[in-house]
Each structure stands twice: as structure tokens, then as C-alpha cells.
Amino acid sequence: MTPAPPQDTDRTAASRAAVAARRARAAVKAQIVAGERSALDVAEAAWRGDHEAEETLRVTELLTSIPGVGPVRAQHILDGLGISHRKRLGGLGARQRPRLRAFLRARQPRPGNALTVLSGPTAVGKSTVSTYIREHYPEVHFGVSATTRAPRPGEVDGVDYRFVSDAEFDRLVAEDELLEWAQVHNRSRYGTPREPVMAAIAAGRRVLLEIDLQGARQVRAKLPEATLVFLAPPSWEVLVSRLTGRGTEAPEEQRRRLDTAQVELAAQDEFDRLVVNHDVVQAAAEVVESMDVPRGTTAS
């Protein structure tokens, strides 16, 4: 058999090497998708310089391997971190690596955490995101808040809220039956009954509470192991548009809520994770991802 010319031999070897490299990177991505490795672990391996597959993996590929992060979300993340979509992990600069490391570290599940608190400014879409999670993620157990306000159209007692009188709320507070409570917008009171939440945690469930900033702080004080997730709007202008556009409050009430929202937005650094509500489906997926829900569980 006539041997191949040296040039053809080099091309064949290069082609085989390229295929092997692509397969190696694909294997790394598959490990992240399967939960066998974290994205942070892959990035750290790349920066140690002893894993070629990790070093040559594009940051975009790393991000889209994380459950719940698609191409659009990945681009938003890259823009926020100041990283080009063409960059590979091994090629990140001295300023880019710490930013990506901090982002990935913040997304690490907190082992043993059973309680997640979703909070954020008024009109950011907390109820909408929570409703989507309730309808599409049956493995998540919801804590139902008690409130003294009247039901809004379509709300169901015991599902959306537990609607109670002022006298009943006073009793819950006096007998220490609430995990947290607050008076919101200087009007209605909201609180989370303690017993159902603690019973769900004892049963091994992952519990989600959708509460306001004051309540989130109380939960953090009583249960420091809880994960606090801050739901933020894409911009202040979007938040104003959402609040004024829904037409459920009078102009005076809208102004009061916007004033409150400014204070609430300034508190986001107190939280463990930040989820920007560009899209309800994506935001819901990120919240559920933060909960590290065990596979095969169902909510009652």
C-alpha cells in the first residue's frame, strides 16, 4: 500500500485530533447537564491549566450546559460579566475570571437547604413566577401566606392565600404561630403560618415561600440556612410600566408602591441569589434550580 503523502498525513492527524477535542468538550458538557460536575468545578479545572477539554470550552457552552440557562439567558449573563461569546475558559483575563467565578459560585446549590424564600419589589412578578412554578413544578411545596386583605379576582382561599380577619391575625401573632409577618404598604398584614412549613421540611420536601422583604429578613433571622432569592425587574422603567399597567391600584396607591419598590430594590445585596425577571418561564426555572429539588419527589 502506497503511504499517504506527509501533507495528507498531517491533515488526517489534525482532523482526528479536532474530532477527539470536540468529543472531550461534549463529554464535559454532558457531565454538567447530568449533575455529575458543577460548572464552577469545570471552570476551576480549566484555570488550573491541566485539563485541555475544559480550557478550550467556550464560556457560552459552559453556561448553556447549566440546567435552565438557554442561549438568550447565556448572552445576558455574558453581557453582564463583560465576556465575549467567543471567549474560551482558558482564555479569560485576570478580571474576567473572578467575575465568572463569583457568578458560578452564587449558583451553587446549598446542601441540605429545604427552604427557599422568593422576594423582590412590588409589581416585579413574584406572584406570576410563583403561579408558574406551582403549575409546572409539582415537586415544589408551597407555603401559603395568611393575609388580612380581601381576595383579588380569581384568588382562592387556602391556595393563593389564607384570607383571615384582623382578629384572627392578631391571634396568630400572639400565639407565635407565624414564621414571619409584616404590614405591607401601610395597610394589609401578611404572614406565614409556621406549622405547615416546618411539617413539610420535616417530611423532606423543598418549600418555597413568596413573601415581601420584611418577611424575608425575619425568616433569615430565624432560619439562617434558608436560601433567599431576589426577583428583580430588567429595569426600573419596566417595573413602573408593570405596576401602572396592571390597573389594580389607584394612582395614590401606585405612588406609594413605587416609593416602597425603590427601598426594596436597594436591599438585593442581602440575598443569596438574584434572578432577573426578563421572562416568567426562565425566571421560574432559575428559582427552582436554586432549590436543589430531589428527583422523584412530589408536592402534596
Image: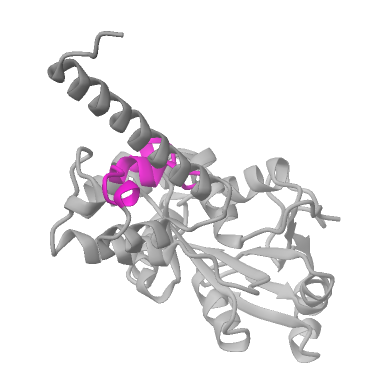
In the rendered image, residue 257 lying in the magenta stretch gets the answer no
The secondary structure that most of the magenta stretch takes on is helix
Residue 166 drawn at (x, y percent) = 75, 75
Whether residue 23 is visible to the viewer of this picture, yes or no, is yes
Give the colour scheme of this rendering.
one colour
Vertical relation: 227 (above or below) 241:
below
Q: Name the residue rendered at 70%, 65% in the picture.
A: 207
Magenta span: 52-74
Furthest toward the front, the residue is 1
Image vertical order of residue 4 relative to residue 68, above or below: above
Q: Nearer the viewer, residue 249 or 132?
A: 132
Residue plotted at (65% across, 71% down): 115
Q: Position of residue 85 (x, y in %)?
A: 23, 39
In magenta segment, residue 56: yes
Quadrant hosting residue 271: bottom left
Say which residue appears at 39% left-offset and 68% top-offset: 264
Q: Residue furthest top?
A: 2
Residue 159 placement (x, y as % from top left) = 79, 53
On the image, the x and y values in percent for residue 248 come to 54, 45
Residue drawn at x 29%, y 30% is 18
Q: Using the image as rendered, state which of residue 17 and residue 151 is in the foreground.
A: 17
Q: Is residue 82 visible?
A: no
Q: Nearer the viewer, residue 179 or 2?
A: 2
In this rendering, would 95 be left or right of 101?
left
**Rendered-image quadrant of the C terminus:** bottom right
